[in-house]
Amino acid sequence: MIFLTFFIGLIANFIGYIPPGNINLTLVQITINRGIKEAVRFITAFSAVEFFFTYFIMHAARWLSGQLKLGTIIDWIMVVLFGVMGYITWIHRNAPPKANYSEHASIKYGILLGFLNPMQVPFWMVTGTYLITHEWILDGRVALVIFSLGSAAGAFLCLFIYAKFAKYIQERFALSNKLINTSIAILFFAFATYHVVKQIYLSFFKH
């Protein structure tokens, strides 16, 4: 049962990080600009925070699912987050990558984004409630710790594959840092626009 709980957490969060979002796009940028070593530091720090994040959200999943305004709040937080990250990426798109980075820079960045990860709240609200309600996992303290460890492992595995794939694409097609940074900035702005349009539609057109 312990192994199954861990495995479910791993698979669930692995799937959760497959769609492009602020975390994996940031990881691609770090991989391209700083190298795979810094990317692994980022992933390790982020996955450690993901353990605590998952544990807290799973405890609060049922309560959070009943908060009617939560989805709207998360959408506007994502608009700000994507907008800021897009702006920062855009203004630095022409900057050449530094030769050396602080040993702890990527670790600090991973910890910061681990806490600033609102997209995972609705994911675990739906997934967590489903898994607990259908008794795929227990909602006891030990079970949720094991599940959260699996979640952290799933995040690490998916993001590590993202990093290796990003490095492969860069080397295979000899893409410039400017092109990659510009593309990532455009995606950040596109995601911000999506959340704005979504809220406009829900507020004015959906009855």
Image (cartoon, helix red, strand yellow):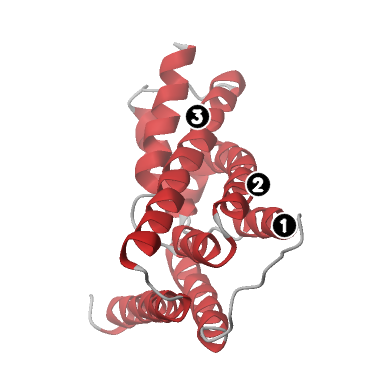
Residue type highlighted by circle 2: Ala
Q: Position of residue 91 (x, y in %)?
A: 55, 88
Residue 20 in view, yes or no = no
Q: Secondary structure at mark 3?
A: helix
Q: Is residue 130 left or right of residue 74?
A: left
Would you say the residues marked 1 and 2 are in contact, meaning their CB atoms lie under 8 Å apart? yes
- Distance from Cα at disc 1 to Cα at disc 3: 22 Å
Q: Which residue is mark 3?
A: 150
Q: Position of residue 178 (x, y in %)?
A: 46, 81
Give above or below for 66 relative to 198: above
Residue found 53% across the figure and 85% down from its top: 87
Nearer the N terminus, badge 1 or badge 3?
Answer: 1
Nearer to the camera, 32 or 23: 32
Give above or below for 39 relative to 196: above
Residue found 37% across the figure and 52% down from its top: 165
Q: Position of residue 71 (x, y in %)?
A: 43, 63
Tell me the mark number nearer the camera, choosing from 3 and 2.
Answer: 2
Crowd band around label 1 with a 10 angstrom C-alpha radius: few (<14), some (14–19), many (20+): some
Q: Which residue is mark 2?
A: 45
Nearer to the camera, 69 or 151: 151
Would you say the residues marked 1 and 3 are in contact, meaning their CB atoms lie under 8 Å apart? no
Residue found 23% across the figure and 82% down from its top: 205
Crowd band around label 2 with a 10 angstrom C-alpha radius: few (<14), some (14–19), many (20+): many
Q: Which residue is mark 1?
A: 108
Q: Secondary structure at mark 2?
A: helix
Q: Position of residue 172 (x, y in %)?
A: 32, 60
Nearer to the camera, 78 or 36: 36
Q: Secondary structure at mark 1?
A: helix
Give above or below for 109 relative to 175: above
Residue found 33% across the figure and 83% down from its top: 200
